[in-house]
């Protein structure tokens, strides 16, 4: 992405690119309708600085977020640059996962109706849809904890070690991945699986379950796909073109 200007003279080219990508991600989330006023958050680890990450300036609507407005933080909660305000629960979620999972470079958290609906069920997702086949092997259910607490920070990190698609009970959805495109693709498919599951639960007959041997083969296939460096890249590029056509001015 071409930069219009940098957040400050000390910002590296790699950090500025990450800022532009994360600001674009917020605009994409807005486009997809996954917002919950100000209460959800996405982050990315700063390239070359594994102990720091970028997150939204708390109070900005997603379509107001720009590259320079993002808050740069370390894992202790110290603000290092960009904006000045952050969501305390957001810091807990993102720092906990980054500290526990060194290979994770992006974390996304949502409160969509479908995701929140499935999160109230003990084991909400079943092998009933093609969408579920993309994520079912990667789903981890996480018990509801005390927001913004040190205990929850550590517990979320432990859950994230088990899979990249988290369903925090009584809360919403969360995805973690090695790149922004991979994380977005994970959350999109998890959201779709939740939507289909909720629709199926309103019907007057039980759903058709996908055969176990097919579920097993799908899990092997998806594990291999998620390990590739370009997982989600094509969808990411298409969505970037969409928000650019809409005139989004996030590269500033």
Image (tube, helix red, strand yellow):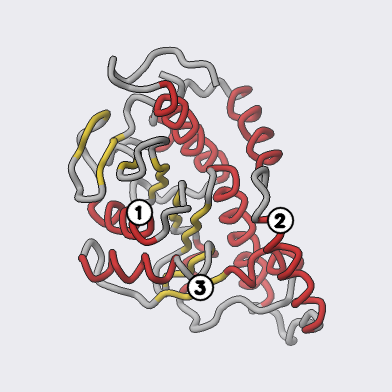
Q: In 3D space, how far apart are the residues under numbered discs 3 and 2 (Cα atoms)?
A: 19 Å
Residue 136 position (above or below residue 228): below
Marks 1 and 3, the one that precedes in the sequence: 1
Q: In 3D space, how far apart are the residues under numbered discs 1 and 3 (Cα atoms)?
A: 16 Å
User: How many residues crowd around disc 1 within 10 Å: few (fewer than 14), some, or many (20 or more)?
Assistant: many
Residue 88 position (above or below residue 140): above
Residue 151 in sight = yes
The numbered disc on residue 94 is 1
Marks 2 and 1, the one that precedes in the sequence: 1
Q: Secondary structure at mark 3?
A: strand
- Please tell me in which quadrant of the rendered image residue 98 appears: bottom left
Q: Name the residue that disc number 3 marks.
A: 140
Going by the image, does 110 lie left or right of 124? Answer: left
Q: Residue at x 45, y 67 (%)?
A: 161
Q: Name the residue that disc number 2 marks.
A: 225
Going by the image, does 186 lie left or right of 208? Answer: left
Residue 119: x percent and y percent? 47, 73
Residue 108 in sight = no
- Please tell me in which quadrant of the rendered image residue 58 appears: top left
Q: Secondary structure at mark 1?
A: helix
Going by the image, does 105 lie left or right of 54? Answer: right
Q: Residue at x 64, y 30 (%)?
A: 242
């Amino acid at each position: 992405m071409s930069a219009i200007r940098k957040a400050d003279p000390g910002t590296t080219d790699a950090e500025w690119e990450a800022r532009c990508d994360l600001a674009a991600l917020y605009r994409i989330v807005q486009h997809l309708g996954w917002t919950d006023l100000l209460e959800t958050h996405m982050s990315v680890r700063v390239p070359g600085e594994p102990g720091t990450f970028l997150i939204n300036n708390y109070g900005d609507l997603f379509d107001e977020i720009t590259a320079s407005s993002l808050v740069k933080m370390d894992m202790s909660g110290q603000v290092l640059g960009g904006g000045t305000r952050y969501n305390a629960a957001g810091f807990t979620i993102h720092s906990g996962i980054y500290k526990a999972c060194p290979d994770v470079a992006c974390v996304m958290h949502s409160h969509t109706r479908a995701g929140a609906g499935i999160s109230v069920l003990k084991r909400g997702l079943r092998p009933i849809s093609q969408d579920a086949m993309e994520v079912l092997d990667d789903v981890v259910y996480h018990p509801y904890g005390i927001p913004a607490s040190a205990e929850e920070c550590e517990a979320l990190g432990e859950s994230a070690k088990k899979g990249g698609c988290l369903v925090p009970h009584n809360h919403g959805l969360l995805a973690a991945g090695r790149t922004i495109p991979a994380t977005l693709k994970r959350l999109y498919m998890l959201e779709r699986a939740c939507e289909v599951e909720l629709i199926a639960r309103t019907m007057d007959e039980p759903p058709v379950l996908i055969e176990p041997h097919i579920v097993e083969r799908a899990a092997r296939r998806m594990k291999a796909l998620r390990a590739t460096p370009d997982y989600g890249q094509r969808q990411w590029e298409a969505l970037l073109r969409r928000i650019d056509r809409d005139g989004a001015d996030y590269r500033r």
